[in-house]
Image (cartoon, grey):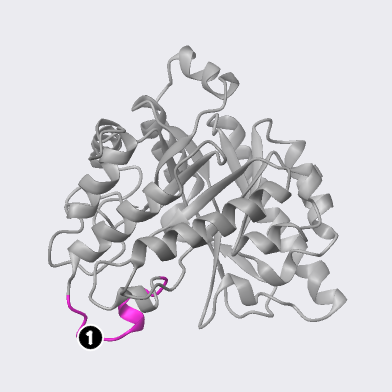
Amino acid sequence: MRIILPSLLLLISGCAPIQMKGVNLLQSSNVALDDLHNAGNMQNLKALGANTVAFVPFIRQSSTNSCELTEDEHYSITRLHSAIDYAHMAGLRVVLKPQILVQGSWAGEVDPGSEAGWSCWFASYTQQMTALAKLAQDSHTEILVIGTELKKTEQRAEWRTLTDTVRRIYQGKLSYVAHDVEDLAAFSALDKLDSVAITYYPTLKEDGIREQMKQLAGKIRAAAEKLNKPFWIAEIGITSRAGALANPWLWPEQLGKGSIADPALQAIVLDGWLAELAGKWHQGILIWNWYSDENAGGMTDVDFTIQNKPAKDAVSCHWKQRCH
């Protein structure tokens, strides 16, 4: 379903920068992004104090050295456009943050190997990004991320040409999301971006969690300030399962069966990160994650979502600046 937006929303992208507070929203198995139930889901996010939502259109790649990229059928342009409309109608700003899914690996290992392979890969990736740039322009998306965690590609000069291609289509803000802050300094098109960001899932020890967070937050801030570029945190999160401190980036299915729910741990960790990372030195933080189904999550769930768990209230109190 397509919705005609009020003309007032056309002015959103011209507003002064605000600190982003929100989530990365994924499609659930039973509620599509363009389902009207997801429109209500956006309203719920706004009521919790969020001001931003990131949609994550997945791009599939069969292997790390392949150059054949295909759109994930669940994140079609039409479906994404409706979801963006829903978000804008709820008063949320939108980030479009594509993510490559590699069979048996992850985006950070993408490496075609040869010069011919790199040429083929960037041609395929530019095709995917061109379609998303058109979507971002047509839907008045506030921020378009040109890549996420593509660690082995970041020094390639092709990023400069790709960025110029996207700029000819999309008039909003461009960003890149790295796996860690040190990688950003080496990104070949850094000067062509409006901002940069990272995903952040560090291992933590059980003792002295907040002190560890304080030290890590200080290191991120120091490294980010050296970039002399607006900086934000595109993903931070942890599953609500016992033992998740050791490897907070893992999905429960990667560990097999037998995970035990620990929603209190998730709440403690996210509350701590939002407290220790607070301040005007960055442009915002987005939690990983939230689903299109407002009934997702729950106290026995061991997934990343904060829905219907104590973490939702812990995060909301930071968004509303009413934490005690």
Query: In this view of the protein, which residue sits in the foreground, 217 or 248?
Result: 217
Query: In this view of the protein, which residue sits in the foreground, 63 or 301?
Result: 301
226 relative to 180, above or below? above
Q: Is residue 300 left or right of residue 316?
A: left
Q: Position of residue 235 (x, y in %)?
A: 47, 55
Name the residue: 80% across, 45% down: 191
Q: Position of residue 27 (x, y in %)?
A: 35, 54
Q: Is residue 239 left or right of residue 52?
A: left
Q: Position of residue 79 (x, y in %)?
A: 42, 45
Q: Quadrant of residue 237?
A: bottom left
Judge whether residue 215 can be spotted in this image. yes
> Which residue range is magenta in the image?
249-260
Q: Is residue 97 left or right of residue 50?
A: right
7 relative to 67, above or below? above
SS of the residue under disc 1: loop
Residue 78 painted magenta: no
Crowdedness near tag 1: few (<14), some (14–19) or many (≥20) residues, C-alpha within 10 Å: few
Q: Position of residue 111 (x, y in %)?
A: 71, 77
Query: In this view of the protein, which residue sits in the foreground, 39 or 46?
Result: 46
The residue indicated by pointer 1 is: 257
106 relative to 264, above or below? below
Viewport quadrant of the C terminus: top left
What residue type is disc 1 on? Answer: Lys
Q: How many numbered marks, from 0 up?
A: 1
Name the residue: 85% across, 75% down: 116
Magenta-highlighted stretch: main secondary structure? loop
